[in-house]
Image (cartoon, grey):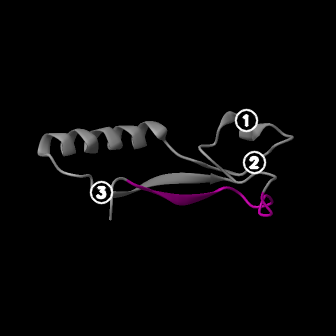
Amino acid sequence: MGIGNHPISKIPRISLTSIAQSPEQIAQTAMDELFTCIAEKRSPTLRLHFPGELIVRESSRLSHRKSTTSQKSATLGRD
C-alpha cells in the first residue's frame, strides 16, 4: 500500500491501493508549529491527525469494495 496517492499508483499494471492526503495542509501545519516553537523557544509537542481517503485498487483484496474514508496520523515532536 502506498501513501500520498502518487499518480503512478493509477497505472493499471501497478494499481496500488493508496492513502490520499493533502501534503499542502500537512506542510502548512508543520511550518506554523515550527515558527511558533522558534518564537516561543520551546520544543514541538503537537500530535495532529490529518484526514485521508483510502483509494482501493487492485493491489488490495478489498478492491471489489468502494473507496472509504480513513484517518492517517502525523506526529510533530514528542508525545
Instruction: Read off the magenta span.
Output: 60-75
Q: Position of residue 4 (x, y in %)?
A: 59, 43
The numbered dot on residue 46 is 3
**Sequence-first disc among 3 and 1:** 1
Q: Amino acid at mark 2?
A: Leu
The quadrant holding residue 24 is top left
**Image quadrant where one finds the N terminus:** bottom right
Task: Using residue 26 as the reference point, say whether residue 59 is left or right of it.
Answer: right
Q: Vertically, is 66 above or below 2?
A: below
Q: Which residue is mark 2?
A: 16
Residue 66 magenta: yes
The residue where tag 1 is placed is 8
x and y, in percent, of residue 41 in the image: 14, 46
- Residue type at numbered disc 3: Leu
Which residue is painted at 34% across and 43% down in the image?
30
Q: Is residue 31 magenta?
A: no
- State the image coordinates of residue 63 (x, y, percent, origin top left): 78, 58
